[in-house]
Image (cartoon, grey):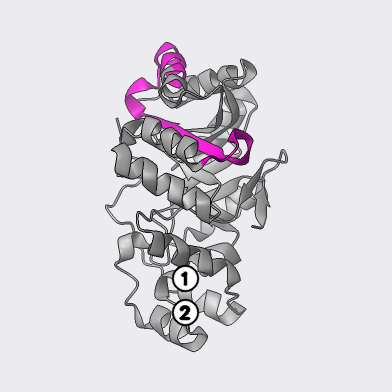
């Protein structure tokens, strides 16, 4: 699989695997199946309550630990420095791993005003060897600039809501200008845009699925999508997007579907609080 590279040389595959709502034995089996199909980037979170199940999926797959890029996230309620420090340690303990490949702040929660503390705790955890790479989710340019001004360290990854109805043109441009890899959560907008005529017409022209078209659109824009797929069939279908090349006109037509109110739940990081 091709890769995207951050400003400091961190390489991530152009398509990852989301694990939201994948829990317990069935979740571990789904993760193991995804790894068997070729996925290496796994996206978990403290708030998903599945860090252990995703790690168990890695073990069940038989894959070497160094072949897997395991991600987890710090919840908003633990952004104070000491809380963040302990939560990172707890995430690591839940997995049973010696280190986490990537750890992200889940939301900036700017009204709480502690995301810089959380970021410093993550910088320190990286220096301790608990985390190899650090990043954020849902950070606007103003939040990223604050991290740079206060700590001198920019995130390597910014995971944001991004899909054809909310293409994030300005945020993506900022991330790319600063060498930050942009990941897309809910890259298929939970499936509600797969019947859009623009997307279905392009899918028919290429004789592929609508989902593959949307994932190929992400890749063409240098966005790393992390779709969740519990079934083996959907896991394989999503990987088929790697073989689909959209022409610039098709990419532009899909981007033009963007709406001012395109967010799924109107979760604006400037005001939204997640705990």
Q: In this view, does 245 lie above or below 127?
A: below
Q: Residue at x 52, y 37 (%)?
A: 70
Q: What stretch is highlighted in magenta?
A: 62-89
Q: Where is residue 165 in the image (x, y as percent from the top left)?
A: 38, 66
Q: Circle 1 sits in a helix, a strand or a loop, which is it?
A: helix
Q: Where is residue 52 in the image (x, y as percent from the top left)?
A: 38, 30
Classify 10 Å Cα crowding around label 2: few (below 14), some (14-19), many (20 and above). some
Res. 269 in view = no
Q: Where is residue 126 in the image (x, y as percent from the top left)?
A: 60, 22
Q: Nearer the viewer, residue 224 or 94?
A: 94
Is 139 contained in the magenta span?
no
Q: Residue furthest left?
A: 265
Dots 2, 1 in contact, CB < 8 A:
yes
Classify 10 Å Cα crowding around label 1: few (below 14), some (14-19), many (20 and above). many
Q: Which of 160 and 133 is in front in this view?
A: 133
Is 71 contained in the magenta span?
yes
Q: Residue at x 48, y 19 (%)?
A: 117
Q: In this view, does 232 lie above or below 148?
A: below
Q: Mark 2 points at which residue?
A: 208
How far apart in space, not on screen, are marks 2 and 1 (Cα)?
A: 7 Å
Q: Circle 2 sits in a helix, a strand or a loop, which is it?
A: loop
Q: Residue furthest bottom?
A: 205
Q: Is residue 118 above or below residue 1?
A: above
State the quadrant of the N terminus: bottom right
- Residue 137 in the figure: left or right of residue 127: left
Q: Residue at x 52, y 56 (%)?
A: 37
Q: Name the residue under label 1.
A: 212
Q: Residue at x 57, y 81 (%)?
A: 249
């Amino acid at each position: 699989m091709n890769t995207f590279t951050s400003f400091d040389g961190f390489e991530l595959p152009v398509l990852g695997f989301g694990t939201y709502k994948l829990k317990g034995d069935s979740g571990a089996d789904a993760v193991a199946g995804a790894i068997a199909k070729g996925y290496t980037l796994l996206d978990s979170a403290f708030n998903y309550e599945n860090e252990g199940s995703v790690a168990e999926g890695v073990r069940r797959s038989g894959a070497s630990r160094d072949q897997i890029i395991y991600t987890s996230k710090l919840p908003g309620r633990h952004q104070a420095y000491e809380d963040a420090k302990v939560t990172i340690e707890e995430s690591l303990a839940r997995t049973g791993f010696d280190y986490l490949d990537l750890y992200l702040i889940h939301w900036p929660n700017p009204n709480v005003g502690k995301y810089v503390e959380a970021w410093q705790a993550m910088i320190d955890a990286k220096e301790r060897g608990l985390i190899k790479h650090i990043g954020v989710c849902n950070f606007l340019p103003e939040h990223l600039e604050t991290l740079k001004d206060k700590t001198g360290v920019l995130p390597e990854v910014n995971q944001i809501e991004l899909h054809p109805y909310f293409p994030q043109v300005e945020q993506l441009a900022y991330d790319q200008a600063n060498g930050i890899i942009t990941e897309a959560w809910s890259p298929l907008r939970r499936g509600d845009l797969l019947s859009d005529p623009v997307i279905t017409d392009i899918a028919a022209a290429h004789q592929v699925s609508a989902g593959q078209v949307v994932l190929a659109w992400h890749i063409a824009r240098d966005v790393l999508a992390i779709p969740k797929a519990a079934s083996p069939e959907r896991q394989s279908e999503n990987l088929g997007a790697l073989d689909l090349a959209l022409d610039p006109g098709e990419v532009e037509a899909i981007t033009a579907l963007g709406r001012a109110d395109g967010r799924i739940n109107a979760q604006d990081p400037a005001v939204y609080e997640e705990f």
